Image (spheres, rainbow, N blue to C red):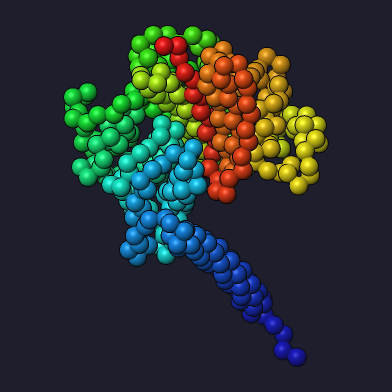
Amino acid sequence: MKKITSKRRKRDAWIAYLHRTSNSRSHKRNRRRKIINDEFLKLNAWIQQKSQEGLNITVRGTRVMLTLPKKMNFSNHYELTTLYLTAIRKLAEKKRKSKKVFKLAAVYFDDLEELSTSAALVLTAEISKWDDSVRSKLAFDPNRWNSKIVRQLYDLGYFDLFKNNPFKGLGKDINYFYDVKLVPYIKGECGDSSKARILKKGIREIVGEDVNKWTFLHSGLTEAVTNVTHHAYPDEGKFSRRDKNWYLSGSFDEKQKVLKIVFYDQGIGIPKSLPASKVWEKALVFLSKIPIIDRKKDEVLLKAAVEMDRTSTGMNDRGKGLQDLLEFIKQRDNGYLSIISHKGLYKYSMKRGREKVKSVSFERSLLGTLIIWNVVLEK
């Protein structure tokens, strides 16, 4: 039997190593290719399905042009409004592993005629997120937009998102009219609760005077920002630092004397963050009174969160934020607090001393948490 030389032995070992690593690399490539194909099929199939359900899109190759509907609000057109907002979020996602995956190329406002303050803020937040992902390269042409929408978004500060702002330097002399005064939207990062003071200044400017019982509202806003910091963007959610934002604005209808304040974050939502919180055991006591089949509904989890007298941090010197939000409404004796998160709605309203609580489950999800305060000021 011929003796195998040391040189031959090393060569055989090297060939065996190359064979093993080649198979491993091939397996990884196949797995990566499967993930890419799944992503491609899932998103593209979702867009095509929603286009059959009423999503107004034009597709050229993989570029998707989205035309907004005539009316966007969360009171009478929730399902349609969230459909378009979700489409923007999905299509604008920066992480693309395949060139075959649909991506957002344009959002057209040409058909849009009515836009609520809350829908305007959420739409601005989603466009801002998209603009961040493309490094502020978005461009637009508002010449064919409804003049009311242009004025509304101008007052909201929407156009300041873009480097190529067509209205820059025009100031208040812009030749459009909108009958509701707006506070320019405020964009903050996690933990930045000091910007709530900017809102107070803006509210005073549009109302013309200080708002009574502001302390309750300020406490509620501060708590909302704190909750975003602790719960909206958990580490396991793999959110980048650039994505951990919240948005705030306000409006005042002079004729109806209605003040509305809107807060929005793009996090995981209250129903998903509550089970991981420190007050989950206390929430279970509340949920034990609910039929088992309903305990996982977003509207039920929202109601449990509002009725907890402590936040999920378990700290005794905090946690009165939601109660303060409710107290602000009670002190005005005419208004409501509405919280929308994922597929759930919790709404507390008071009018002439009569309280009413409403909860609703929706078909579609709002990606994040939206809080709306609506009060009627004394005439």
**In the picture provided, is 179 more to the left or to the right than 239?**
left
Q: How many marks?
A: 0
Q: Nearer the viewer, residue 298 or 158?
A: 298
Q: Quadrant of residue 309?
A: top right
Which residue is rendered at x = 44% and y = 39% of the image?
A: 73
**Whether residue 269 can be seen here:** no
**In the picture provided, is 65 more to the left or to the right than 88?**
left
**In the picture provided, is 106 more to the left or to the right than 213?**
left
Which residue is rendered at x = 37% and y = 48% of the image?
A: 69
Residue 297, image x, y percentages = 68, 43
Tell me if residue 226 comes above or below residue 270 in the rendering.
Answer: above
Q: Nearer the viewer, residue 139 or 270?
A: 270
Residue 170, image x, y percentages = 18, 27
Quadrant containing the N terminus in the rendered view: bottom right
Which residue is rendered at x = 41% and y = 18% of the image?
A: 257
Q: Quadrant of residue 224?
A: top right
**In the picture provided, is 334 more to the left or to the right than 157?**
right
Which residue is rendered at x = 77% and y = 31% of the image?
A: 286
**Whether residue 314 can be seen here:** yes
Residue 86, image x, y percentages = 48, 48
Q: Quadrant of residue 199?
A: top left
Quadrant containing the C terminus in the rendered view: top left
Residue 124, image x, y percentages = 39, 37
Tell me if residue 345 comes above or below residue 36 in the rendering.
Answer: above
Q: Nearer the viewer, residue 338 or 125?
A: 338
